Amino acid sequence: MPPLSVIAPITAARVAVCGPASWNHLIVLDRLPEPVPHMQFALGDHHTLGGTSAGKVLHLADQGVDVTLHALLGDDADGRLVASALTTANVPVAAYNSERTERHANLMTQAGERVSLYLSTPSSPVPSDLDRIDEAVAQAEIAVIDLSELGAALVERRRAGAVGAPIWTDLHDYDGSSAFHEPFLRAADVVFMNDDGTADPWALMQSCLDRGPRLAVCTLGARGAIALTAAGERAETPAVPVEVVDTNGAGDAFFAGFLAASLAGEDLEGCLAAGARQATVALASVHLHPAVASR
């Protein structure tokens, strides 16, 4: 595997994705563990690339979008595995030094339920690296800033007056009140989320738009996805039928499909439909994207 320094140039890309890339151990169970001492047998397990930002760049690259991932990676075995998986999938990576690489153990069920155990997290980004990322973001057309300590630092800079591309952010299972999510929401031009944290996704999206974004998108799992603009336009799309192999990364694939369609000039319904189609690529693979398997 190449040393990390080989894959750390600053490149100007149309889309700059900033956030987590990790090396994960996925363990498939027939049910999530109960909170009592007991024994369970796994149905299967494998190690693979993880991280919400890694998932997005894989699917953006698959759609032909000029994209670069900006991520904190340790010069360790896990970091080299992450770098190898991404470069094999032809994803440009700007790696910034961390004391360690992010690593998870994910307990999964075949129904898509998940408990993520964070085994290690990156060290805090240093100001010089944040300067380098700000430079790349200033040259991009879209900046995807994902939930993470790195993302929080970049968002804080933006809210303090830093110049850069419009921010698209993924709030994941946002419930409408999380303090950690709030700066990302208020700095964003476009926000994505899923309906795990709400019984009324339309109301949740409207509450997000009331704080500044121009567009909110919510995925509904097997029921498809919906979108709401600040002007009040609504749109929705059904999910695309697929034989589900693994649900990891489906939301990131949807995000990437939607963004790629938006860059291509599709209308709101067309972007939703493109997101739903791209989600099936992740759902049909045990990896974030089939390209990872070639590693």
Image (spheres, grey):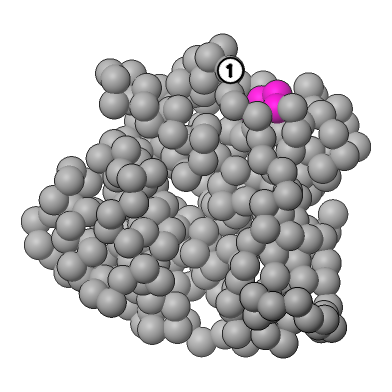
- 66 or 248, nearer to the observer: 248
Give me the residue at 44% from left, 78% from top: 221
Asked whether the viewer can see residue 256, the reply is yes
Compared with 245, 80 (above or below) is above
Q: In the rendering, at what x and y percent does residue 266 appear?
A: 31, 59
Q: Residue at x 18, y 52 (%)?
A: 209
Element class at badge 1: loop
Residue 239, percent across and down? 43, 81
Give the residue number, with chain letter if any, for mark 1: 126
Horizontally, residue 274 falls left or right of residue 267, namely right
Q: Residue at x 69, y 64 (%)?
A: 106
Horizontal and vertical percent for residue 248? Answer: 62, 67
Based on the picture, tell me whether residue 225 belongs to the magenta stretch: no
Looking at the image, residue 277 sits to the left or right of residue 86; the answer is left
Residue 95 belongs to the span the image colors magenta: yes
Most common SS among magenta residues = strand
> Which of 263 and 81 lies nearest the eye of the viewer?
81
Can you say which quadrant of the picture contains the N terminus? top right
| Circle 1 residues within 10 Å: few <14, some 14–19, many ≥20 | few
Pick the residue in front: 74 or 29: 29
| Range drawn in magenta | 94-98
Is 111 displayed left or right of 198 in the figure? right
- Amino acid at circle 1: Val
